[in-house]
């Protein structure tokens, strides 16, 4: 396999220009005792295209939600560039930011629908709110758009007058989704859209997201800590660890043949994708003596070195993000070799 280093890693299928482009994004919150804190996001490169679902996976604290918040101007961007529909939006403030939000071209599904839905408004009023604030359509068309959005997410007419407190968790998430798509956005950011739902409701909401991206054609970014939730709907997957994209590529390839040991740990811990990858937790150990075990890596080391069972002295320096084929990238010194040294699965 040919591997070449790149300064600006990109994963771009031969289709239309990206709706969302993120280039070298760094986000950090303030300082502590006069010293700059560790960036929440560090040199992130991502694309999201119309009609595609990009899954962003990582454990709690990896920077997933901060990534989505940075896109809509809710997180402080230290450096880098964010482009929506070809227009730079990095660091927008005041009137320019309000105009972006009123345009309805970007919508955000928050992680907790109960906290993000006004308890005093009815379902119809909640879904209509983006249209009311933006003034995108007149009052007559507004009612029709609301009804259509609720139909798209499978909520019958009798739900129009209910308030969030009278809805189940799955129904509240459908209302949140209807509110997000009523403006017919070009980009939809869904932050942990199914994390608090039972299995059957989770599958239904994921199917709704899949159907809506096909019928409405937005670029959809789904943020999750559960790889199994993304397996059935994501076209591409980006893996975040401590604020850095350690791997990204087509979902089938990432799930079945991970290039980064951290991705392998995620697949091994997800029962629904473990069999596809052939990686059990028991196998994620080196089969022979380790060349190095980096318990206290220096600041410029690989971010995963302190946890990686395959770490060597090479990992005391941060790996470049490299291309592996035409559509995959990984930031690992041993992306092409670590899997060859796995221990046999314990019966």
Image (cartoon, rainbow, N blue to C red):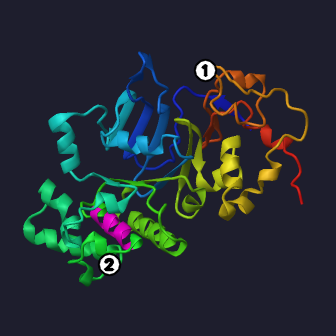
Task: Answer left or right for 145 relative to 299.
Answer: left
> Residue 299, labelled with which disc?
1
**Residue at screen point 53% across, 58% down:** 234
Could you give the CA–CA distance between mark 1 and mark 2, rounded to whole angstroms? 51 Å
- SS for dot 1: loop
* Label ID, residue 28: none
Q: Position of residue 76 (x, y in %)?
A: 34, 32
Helix, strand or loop: magenta stretch? helix
User: Which one is in front, 40 or 250?
Assistant: 40
Q: Residue furthest left?
A: 139
- Please identify the residue farthest to the top as the structure is shown: 34
Q: Which residues are magenta?
A: 171-179
| Secondary structure at numbered mark 2 | loop
Q: Where is 342 relative to 215, above or below?
A: above
Above or below — where is 107 with respect to 319? below
Q: Is residue 75 above or below residue 215?
A: above
Q: Quadrant of residue 210?
A: bottom left
Query: Where residue 195 sits: x, y (%)?
Result: 49, 60
Residue in the picture at 42% in, 41% down: 67
The image shows a total of numbered marks equal to 2
**Residue at the image point whose x is 55% and y is 50% from the top:** 237
Residue 330: give x, y in percent of width and height: 63, 37
Residue sitting at x 73%, y 27%: 295
First-in-chain label (1 vs 2) = 2
Mark 1 surroundings within 10 Å by alpha-carbon count, few (fewer than 14), some (14 through 19), many (20 or more): few
Counting from the top left corner in percent of width and height, residue 196 is at 47, 63
Residue 136 visible from this viewpoint: no
179 to the left or right of 217: left
Quadrant where the image shows the N terminus: top right
Q: What residue would you read off at disc 2?
A: 155
């Amino acid at each position: 396999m040919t591997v070449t280093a790149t300064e600006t890693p990109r994963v771009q299928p031969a289709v239309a220009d990206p709706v969302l482009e993120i280039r070298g994004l760094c986000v950090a919150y303030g300082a502590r005792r006069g010293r700059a804190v560790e960036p929440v996001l560090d040199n992130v490169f991502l694309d999201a295209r119309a009609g595609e679902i990009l899954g962003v996976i990582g454990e709690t604290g990896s920077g997933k939600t901060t990534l989505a918040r940075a896109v809509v101007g809710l997180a402080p961007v230290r450096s880098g560039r964010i482009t929506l529909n070809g227009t730079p939006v990095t660091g927008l403030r005041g009137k320019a930011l309000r105009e972006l939000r009123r345009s309805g071209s970007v919508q955000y599904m928050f992680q907790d629908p109960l906290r993000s839905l006004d308890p005093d408004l009815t379902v119809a009023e909640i879904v209509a709110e983006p249209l009311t604030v933006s003034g995108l359509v007149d009052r007559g068309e507004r009612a029709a758009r609301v009804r259509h959005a609720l139909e798209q997410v499978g909520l019958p007419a009798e739900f129009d007058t209910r308030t969030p407190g009278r809805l189940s968790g799955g129904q509240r998430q459908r209302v949140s989704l209807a509110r997000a798509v009523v403006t017919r956005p070009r980009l939809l950011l869904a932050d942990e859209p199914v994390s608090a739902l039972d299995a059957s409701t989770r599958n239904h909401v994921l199917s709704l997201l899949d159907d809506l991206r096909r019928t409405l054609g937005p670029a959809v970014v789904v943020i999750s800590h559960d790889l199994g939730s993304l397996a059935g709907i994501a076209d591409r997957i980006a893996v975040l660890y401590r604020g850095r994209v350690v791997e990204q590529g087509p979902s089938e390839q990432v799930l079945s043949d991970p290039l980064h040991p951290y991705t392998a740990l995620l697949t091994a811990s997800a029962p629904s994708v473990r069999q596809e990858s052939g990686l059990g937790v028991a196998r994620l150990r080196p089969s022979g003596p380790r060349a190095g075990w980096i318990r206290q890596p220096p600041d410029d080391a690989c971010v995963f070195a302190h946890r990686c069972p395959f770490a060597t002295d090479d990992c005391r320096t941060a790996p470049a993000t490299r291309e592996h084929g035409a559509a995959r990238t990984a930031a690992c010194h041993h992306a092409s070799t670590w899997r060859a040294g796995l221990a046999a699965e314990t019966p």
